[in-house]
Image (spheres, coloured by chain):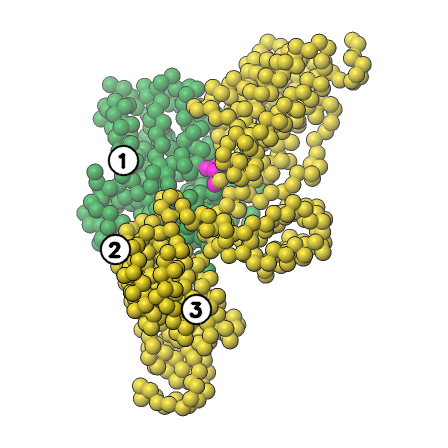
Amino acid sequence: MSLPPESPYAPLEITADALRAALEAAATWLELQAASVNALNVFPVPDGDTGTNMSMTMRAAAEAAAVEPSSEAHAVARAAARGALMGARGNSGVILSQLVRGFAEAVAGHRSLGVRELADGLEGAAQAGYRAVGTPVEGTILTVARRAGEEARAAAGVEGLDVVQFWERVLRVADRAVVETTSQLPVLQSAGVVDAGAQGYRLVLEAFSKTARGEGIEGDGTAAPVASQALVAAQHVEEGGLGFCTEFLVQQAAADEETIRAFMASIGDSVIVVGDDDLRRVHVHTLRPGQALDWAIERGTVSRIKIENMQLQHEAGKATAPGSAGLSSIGVVAVSPGPGFRALFTSMGAAAIVGGGQTMNPSVQDILTAISSVGYQELVVLPNNRNILLAAQQAAEQTPRTVRVVPTRSLPSGIAALLAFNYQEDLDDNVRLMEEAAGRAASIEVTVAERDSEANGLRIKQGQALGLLDDEIVAVAETLMDAALGALARAEPDAREIVTIYWGSGTTREQARELCEAIQAAYGHLETEAVEGGQPHYPFIISVE
Amino acid sequence: MPRIGVVTDSTADFPGDAQARLGIEMVPLTVIWDRDTFRDKLDLSIAEFYRLMKQRSTLPTTSAPAAGLFEETYERMLGEADHVIAVMLASKLSATYEVARSAAERVGKGRISVVDSGQTTICLGWLAMRAAELGTEDAEPTAIVRELESWVSRLRLYAVLDTLTNLQRGGRIGRAQALIGSLLNFKPLILVKEGDVLPIERPRSRASAMRRIVDVVASQGRIEKIGVAEGDAPEIMSDLVRMVGERVPGVPLDRGEIGIVLGTHAGPGVFGVAALLAE
């Protein structure tokens, strides 16, 4: 047999053994690439681990082919088709199994496969794929299968083409078809990725091509790790719109995953770090993207930097967001002092925050501005201080939107009200639920006496710790902790379930933790949680529910 | 009159021995975890599964049954039945329905009807039971499917999770992602309705979550069927059953225990109340 001179070792046909080897290579190649294919899932897809599903399906095909005793290629193909069908997982796996089945049917009767039979097989695969799907969509695995089949047919017509050249032509077209999926489906376009199933099928073709060239399949580490788009998208949904979404790759970082994650968490949130020691992808939301990059640049080679201003994204999203996601059409505006409580209210879904509180009451105009800054037609305002209640009611009357004020008198009652918000109920029901919750939450404030005085029959010396329960002084003690416990003892602790401690700007996390422990020692049935409130003047604000 | 066979998937939960009594076939989904593959309801109990979750650093993933498994099950069932009703886990939550549907097209010859339940656990079990009951009453397949579709629109599954993490990592969080990001802890109360996962409320404690789930169910108008299910949270069941009985009196109450596939996505300590609203 004379071989074409341009590729001296290239085979003209695929034997049964060569087909087994190619299927094995395809399974291995998909397994190696499964994580990066999984990461292409652009929205939380049901059973959406496309890479895993396709690799498991291909593995089943390869195993069935391996144990098929026949020395004829068509029998090996048929065995692979049966194996793929039995092992098919997920939508992508089922479609892949149909492609394998279509291939096997098209090459029926052939002991070995030349380029003409391979073209028959790839065309048959595409046709079976289209038949398997109720409503075929372009920009998916089907498009790649179809164009690979078309190119295979054209290549088979070229005189003297060997198998290596054949697969090169097919793979080139498949590559292009995969890249083009991004522009064919809007959802891919907006995420800037290619279709996961399309990429999976391309990997199968690539494995066949590599096998024909006599190359082994090994992980070469060139595929960039990608954070799951679904995970990233989910992180973005409830952002308060502060700071920058910052993403980059770092190669050969002189810091391990935990160290990177810890640093990024210290300057921001929504931290995702994936990949291996050679190459990691880092994602963080931070007010200071420069710090993240500077830190990484000192420790490795940084590339593919992407920084988005989330505030702008958030505002763009907000213009159309209310109602459009099928969520509640009611927005909540909360009055809050300082960054700590502001972050708390925002994290729990407040649409807008009005700065202000005990020592800095916001104006009616401030509240009106916040109301008109959000896209909601129905709103609830939480004044969170009795001195702000009237301003909130004034604002509610001066806007064409439907605004109800839930008269929360303290920050804890405001948070209790916001947490009681029901996403499925209407405005009236929500106002009722929020008022009830606000009424149930007792509010304790712990502060230090600024001068000697007398109140509620208690003699108070300057510097003593005071515990206020719903604005009344009920405990005087030498330590903040004792004042807090004294006030809690007056708040019907036996009838309560959860105590939340907000520590102030002059207080430490450690002090809050000690108070939690003291409360649990005294009242075993109470759950406690401590978060940073960052409020001035009050070392502790405590919610008792 | 046609003989009807009924098949569902392993995320369906049944009261008592209803599944065996009504001869309902079950095709298992699988949990893939490191190098292990567990068949739902067959290989591992939910309690063992959550114990394992505490030991392992990785998280499991779930997978729809293989298409071939459906083909085999259908072919076996069609040897005895004239028509098969396959009622499956919500297509918005799993590829199971799609796999079951495509397998039915390949082997069914028009003798298999696949219904998207939009549901899971007890709600899915009720649908399979209803199909089997109608089958014994000699109903035509088209009439059975029509009845099931009416039920699908009236089924509600309310659930309290310990955390949203599992739902989020598994990509099933849906619109309940509105609940994510809170700096305070709470026990998310969610609703599954026609395949959508919807946020409801954020009770702070497990006790208040129990009160609220019962309040919310009781406010849904007249209820035809009610059930409770849990995943490794048996300690709350007697209280929950009592509270549901007080607020929704006169409706027999079904109980079920979820399997490891739902356990993967709901996370430890989940409990729920299922209801079929009156027409």
Q: Is residue A353 magenta?
A: no
Give neighbour class at mark 1: few <14, some 14-19, many 20+ (Cα, 10 Å). many
Q: Does the magenta stretch include residue A46?
A: yes
Q: What element carries label 2?
A: helix
Give neighbour class at mark 2: few <14, some 14-19, many 20+ (Cα, 10 Å). few
Query: Residue at the location (51% across, 57% down)?
Result: A242
Q: Which chain is green?
A: B
Percent coordinates x, y for residue B249 in the rendering? 20, 50
Q: Which of marks 2 and 3 is nearer the N terminus?
A: 3
Q: Which amino acid does label 1 sit on?
A: Trp
Is residue A438 visible from the viewing direction of this image? no
* CB-based contact (under 8 Å), mark 3 and mark 1: no
Percent coordinates x, y for residue A93 in the rendering? 52, 29
Q: Is residue A360 above or below residue B216?
A: below
Disc 3: which residue: A337
The magenta-colored residue range is A44-49
Please give the label number shown on residue B151. Answer: 1
Whole-angstrom CA distance, mark 2 to mark 3, is 27 Å
Query: Residue at the location (65% across, 45% down)?
Result: A304
Percent coordinates x, y for residue A419 in the rendering? 37, 59
